[in-house]
Image (cartoon, rainbow, N blue to C red):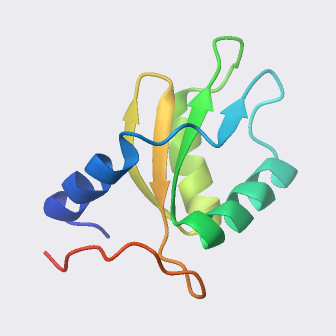
Amino acid sequence: MLSNDQKKFLKKLAHPLKPVFQVGKTGVHDQFIQEIDRVLEKRELIKIQFLQNTFENPVEAGRKISEYTHSELVQVIGHTAVLYRRSEKHRQIDVPLR
């Protein structure tokens, strides 16, 4: 569980990032979650964009994705979700302890 200060730190890092994934009409499915899982291991911090034509609610879908990938949902703003998971092999981000 991330503290508010840690979330604030990650939000700053995520701001300039471009979305890595886009959720469209097909919604969130198993293969999509597996891809997100692989990318989280490499990048640690990613953005997911929910397109206008999706039937998914960004907040609910973000929670669902974070639960399945064992990651933290940092924030959802509009149609964009930010996820973070500390990498085992490719650590790039040093999140402050508090």
Q: Residue at x 48, y 39 (%)?
A: 81
Residue farthest along the top direction in this orientation: 52
Q: Tell me: 10 left or right of 96.
A: right
Q: Residue at x 63, y 70 (%)?
A: 42
Q: Nearer the viewer, residue 17 or 82?
A: 17
Q: Nearer the viewer, residue 4 or 46?
A: 46
Above or below, 26 relative to 11? above
Marker count (numbered):
0
Position of the C terminus, as image quadrant, is: bottom left
Q: Residue at x 65, y 19 (%)?
A: 51
Q: Residue 91: image x %, image y %?
A: 49, 81
Q: Residue 25: image x %, image y %?
A: 80, 21
Quarter of the view holding residue 38? bottom right
Quarter of the view holding residue 57? top right
Quarter of the view holding residue 97? bottom left
Above or below, 2 relative to 47? below
Q: Nearer the viewer, residue 15 or 58?
A: 15
Residue farthest along the bottom direction in this orientation: 89
Q: Tell me: 85 left or right of 20.
A: left
Position of the N terminus, as image quadrant, is: bottom left
Q: Residue 29: image x %, image y %?
A: 81, 45
Q: Tell me: 60 left or right of 93.
A: right
Q: Residue 10: image x %, image y %?
A: 31, 56
Above or below, 94 relative to 33? below
Q: Residue at x 32, y 77 (%)?
A: 94
Above or below, 81 relative to 92? above
